[in-house]
Amino acid sequence: GQEAGSVASGDHRFFEQVFECSNDGHFIIDSRTGGFCLVNPRFIEMTGYERDELLDAGFRPASLVYGRGRERAQEQIETLEEGGSGVFEWICADRNGRVLDVEASLRRIRHEGHSYILGEIRDIGARKNLERRLKEAVEKQRKKTIRAAKAGVRVYQLTDKIRRLPDLLHRLDSVSDE
């Protein structure tokens, strides 16, 4: 019998449930057509498209990628080697034009003699926002440090002049005595 907690490898309902209930947007691209052949509800939610629109033969996955990144995304999809995988950051636009930063994880697989791309997208907008804020804070701190260093140099220069003042006064006094 099966051990407690194990899943039979043939239990397709379990794997279907995992696919359908994931917090990330999952999809499968049929390499023969270049289009989606399976998408999960989270993917539908993230893109704003209906399932039948995404599965339409004319819909190209890279068309979800915003602007100039579209060609690069298409190339990343097409050049993924058999058994190969890649993780990419894409800027996508949903059906309503809302832009979102995503991490796309892709793996080319074979099933029953056909090639597919198993993929998932994860919204990384919060992470990208945090990275941007961190970079801004580092830059702000760098500028403060430079200002403090310059102020320190000015204080040093002023201190040096004050330290030399008695000598200058003595020399000035000597010159005026002559």
Image: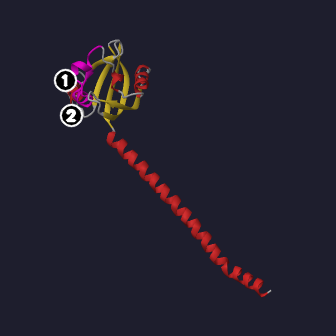
Going 50% across and 59% down the picture, which residue do you hit? Answer: 145
Between 69 and 32, the one nearer to me in the picture: 69
Q: Specify the quadrant that holds the N terminus.
A: top left
Going 43% across and 48% down the picture, which residue do you hit? Answer: 135
Q: Specify the quadrant that holds the C terminus.
A: bottom right
Between 165 and 26, the one nearer to me in the picture: 165
Which residue in the structure is indicated by mark 1? 13
Span shown in magenta: 38-57
Between 77 and 69, the one nearer to me in the picture: 69
Query: What is the CA distance from the residue labelled 2 to the residue labelled 1?
Result: 15 Å
Q: Residue furthest right?
A: 178
Look at the picture and state if 72 lies above or below 149. Answer: above
Residue type for callout 1: Arg
Residue 158 x/y as whole percent: 60, 72
Element under disc 1: helix
For label 2, the crowd category at 10 Å Cα-Cα, with few meaning under 14, some 14 to 19 and many 20 or more, is few
Q: Nearer the viewer, mark 2 or mark 1?
A: 1
Residue type for callout 2: Gly
Between 64 and 165, the one nearer to me in the picture: 165
Going 39% across and 28% down the picture, which residue do you hit? Answer: 67
For label 1, the crowd category at 10 Å Cα-Cα, with few meaning under 14, some 14 to 19 and many 20 or more, is few
Going 24% across and 28% down the picture, which residue do you hit? Answer: 48
Magenta includes 154? no
Q: Quadrant of residue 40?
A: top left
Residue 77 x/y as whole percent: 40, 22
Mark before the other along the chain sequence, 2 or 1: 2
Is residue 86 left or right of 54 when viewed as pictured?
A: right
Q: Quadrant of residue 102?
A: top left
Look at the picture and state if 80 lies above or below 165. Answer: above
Is residue 2 left or right of 122 when viewed as pictured?
A: left
Which residue in the structure is indicated by mark 2? 5
